[in-house]
Image (cartoon, rainbow, N blue to C red):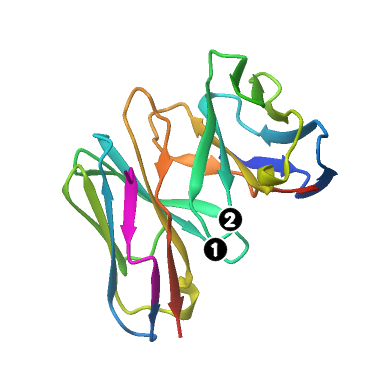
Amino acid sequence: DTAVSQTPKYLVTQMGNDKSIKCEQNLGHDTMYWYKQDSKKFLKIMFSYNNKELIINETVPNRFSPKSPDKAHLNLHINSLELGDSAVYFCASSQAGVNEQFFGPGTRLTVL
Amino acid sequence: KQEVTQIPAALSVPEGENLVLNCSFTDSAIYNLQWFRQDPGKGLTSLLLIQSSQREQTSGRLNASLDKSSGRSTLYIAASQPGDSATYLCAVKSQGGSEKLVFGKGTKLTVNP
């Protein structure tokens, strides 16, 4: 049973395109996150939502727009993709008060 | 601004050896600290979570300690096995309401048979 799932696992696209990555968690958690892991393997927070409300928005270009239709889903839409957006994007979730974060398998985005 | 450092960046040991991975953080006002394991091309697996009020946590052959005042945590792996080969990441959640984790760059562990 997958706790945090992401689709797609791999995404290869051309510069300038718009793409979306989907994330779902079945843990009943109220907080979800997007992290970016760059080519040097460094993981950094991008966004966090609690009960569908944005609570963290790091310094991320506004080409990136997260959307949380309900507390079990957090999607990431990226407009006008650039070469530097190539990375692995991880979704995670946690329950407030417990705070242990659980990660999805990642989406490897390659922009050509 | 919280910064997390992990030393060494890479470690290679023979099977059966006990080993220690180190993590240090600059701001001691933390809420908790979490150790993860990442296998190549895979996501992160949570290993241990230590709350700020705790000194250590144990799971099987793994033991994580926390010394908040000195800004340090260690992950002790007993009787290492080739299957322990992975990158180990330390992440800190600071006090102050922010839900984000700040990660170190990881220690890549190789256990040789």
Q: Please give the name of the residue rendered at 61% of the width and 41% of the height, measured from the top-left corner.
A: B3
**Image mark 2: chain:** A
Q: In which quarter of the image is residue A42?
A: bottom right
Total label count?
2
Q: Can residue B95 be seen in this view?
A: yes
The image's mark for residue A38 is: 1
Which residue position is annotated with label 2?
A42
Residue A60: x %, y % from top left = 40, 60
Q: Residue furthest front?
A: B113
Residue A15: x %, y % from top left = 39, 85
Residue A80: x %, y % from top left = 32, 79
Task: Out of A10 and A85, give the one closest to the viewer.
Answer: A10
Q: Are marks 2 and 1 in contact (CB under 8 Å)?
A: yes
Q: What element carries label 1?
A: loop
Q: Distance between the residues labelled 2 and 1?
A: 6 Å
B95 shown above or below A37: above
Q: Please give the name of the residue rendered at 63% of the width and 20% of the height, measured from the top-left corner.
A: B68
- Which amino acid, by three-letter code, is at mark 2? Phe
The image's mark for residue A73 is: none
- Which amino acid, by three-letter code, is at mark 1? Asp
Task: Left or right? Give the position of A111 relative to B48.
Answer: left
Q: Which quarter of the image is occupied by the N terminus of chain A? A: top left
Q: What stretch is highlighted in magenta?
A: A1-11
**Image mark 1: chain:** A
Q: Is residue A57 visible?
A: no
